[in-house]
Image: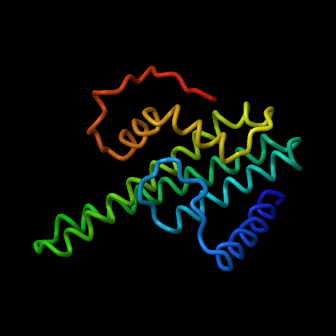
């Protein structure tokens, strides 16, 4: 109940900020084109993590477990969207619609990278972040840049995108800083 209340509160705060101030580029370490909803989700989760660090550090296990579960569910919904896009692409014959679907497929892949990066950050990068005074945005950006190859590998394996599967080492360690 506490987690739901915290997420709902932060959702309202981030939504009102986005509505009045417009979208800020915070939370996009990839530099790739993402959907607006994913940039909103990223900003929301980074705000929630910052609030957890400041006020609810004694509930960190319960809160991070809920965040990780939510991110996993979001990743699977993006994976289902990818499968639907691929199904639509196989049925299309004309070039214009196919180009739009390829662009949506690329945005979907970038969204999956971002969600997997957030999930890995919650699972493996949050421990050192909780003990330091580094802002959550900065910690997430450095975690993502250090672990970008592993995150890409995980997205490729889960999404059956095996372009870079042979080029990466499966035993690559996770870096928390």
Instruction: Name the side, left or right, on which 55 lies relative to 144.
Output: right
Q: Residue at point 66% right, 75% down?
A: 21
Q: Residue at point 70% right, 50% down?
A: 66
Coloration mode: rainbow
Viewer-proximal residue among 121 and 160: 121
Q: Quadrant of the C terminus?
A: top right
Instruction: Name the side, left or right, on which 154 lies relative to 126.
Output: left
Image-quadrant location for residue 80:
bottom left
Question: Residue 165 placed where, x, y %?
Answer: 31, 32
Question: Residue 114 placed where, x, y %?
Answer: 50, 50
Viewer-proximal residue among 142 and 174: 142
Question: Residue 62 placed where, x, y %?
Answer: 78, 45
Q: Residue at point 28% right, 27% down?
A: 166
Residue 89 versus residue 79 in the image, above or below: below
Residue 51 versus residue 156 in the image, above or below: below
Q: Quadrant of the N terminus?
A: bottom right
Viewer-proximal residue among 132 and 82: 132
Q: Residue furthest bottom?
A: 20
Q: Residue at point 71% right, 45% down?
A: 136
Counting labels gives 0
Question: Residue 100 placed where, x, y %?
Answer: 26, 71
Residue 33 versus residue 95 in the image, above or below: above
Image-quadrant location for residue 124:
top right
């Amino acid at each position: 109940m506490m987690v739901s209340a915290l997420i709902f509160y932060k959702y309202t705060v981030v939504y009102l900020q986005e509505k009045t101030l417009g979208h800020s580029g915070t939370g996009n370490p990839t530099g790739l084109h993402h959907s607006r909803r994913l940039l909103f989700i990223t900003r929301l989760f980074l705000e929630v993590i910052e609030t957890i660090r400041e006020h609810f550090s004694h509930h960190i296990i319960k809160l991070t477990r809920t965040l990780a579960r939510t991110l996993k569910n979001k990743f699977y919904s993006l994976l289902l969207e990818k499968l639907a896009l691929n199904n639509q692409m196989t049925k299309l014959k004309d070039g214009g619609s196919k180009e739009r679907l390829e662009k949506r497929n690329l945005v979907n892949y970038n969204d999956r990278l971002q969600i997997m990066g957030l999930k890995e950050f919650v699972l493996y990068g949050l421990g050192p972040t909780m003990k330091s005074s580094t802002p959550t945005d900065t910690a997430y950006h450095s975690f993502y840049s250090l672990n970008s190859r592993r995150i890409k590998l995980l997205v490729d394996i889960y999404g059956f995108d095996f372009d870079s599967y042979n080029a990466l080492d499966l035993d690559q360690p996770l870096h928390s800083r």
